[in-house]
Image (cartoon, grey):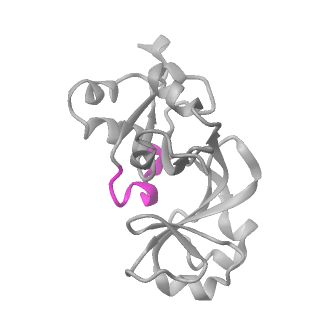
Amino acid sequence: MEPDPVGAEKLTGKLLVAAPSLRGSTFDRAVILMLSHDGDGALGVMVNKPTEVLVGDVLPRWISVVSEPGVVFQGGPVSLDSALGLVAVGGSDEPLGIRRVRGRLGVVDLDTPAEIIEPAVTAMRVFAGYAGWAPDQLEGEIDEGSWYVVDSEPGDAFRTDAQDLWPVVLRRQGGQLALMATFPADPSMN
């Protein structure tokens, strides 16, 4: 097994906030929660891109567990036909069917019966697809200024106003990043 890249453990649980240079791409104003980052690459989900697809329409047994607004979120451009469940775990135990990512945050095996998971979690989101990077690819994108790496707060992944997360996260950083929050969605309309 290869050693982790320097600082890799620091990216798991962090947020990647898309720089304005990604405007017009899949990652336009994206906020990505990093779920893993090691010598094999990186994986995260966009926590601010709700779709109009109801969880009950695609995964009906999870409707009682999933948090409001009860829709599937676009996790990223990779494997759009797959689903990933993200949860906030209520206690310190390692519940069956949940792999902890960092702190209370975990990924749930959606083949686990919902009745087993429900008592152990305080929040849940379902994502279609994910964002993935090959080894060293993400580091290159960060170095070129495509992403701002910032700390996540406990409720970021489960906000009911998720679509407003990009400016919220930038504002709370202060300084130049807070100023970026005022960057117009369409600069030609400025």
Q: Which residue is drawn at 40% across and 69% down?
A: 104
Residue placed most toward the observer, 189 or 121? 121
In the rendered image, residue 79, in percent from the top left (x then y), is placed at 75, 48
Q: In this view, does 37 lie above or below 110?
A: above
Q: Is residue 188 in view?
A: yes
Q: Residue at x 52, y 26 (%)?
A: 141
In the rendered image, residue 63, in percent from the top left (x then y), is placed at 62, 75
Direction from residue 33 to residue 1 in the image, left or right: right
Direction from residue 183 to residue 98 in the image, left or right: right
Q: Is residue 47 in view?
A: no
Residue placed most toward the observer, 130 or 136? 136
Residue placed most toward the observer, 151 or 172? 151
Direction from residue 79 to residue 104 in the image, left or right: left
* Stretch of the chain drawn in magenta: 152-164
Q: In this view, does 24 lie above or below 61?
A: above
Residue 2 counted in the magenta span: no
Residue 158 counted in the magenta span: yes
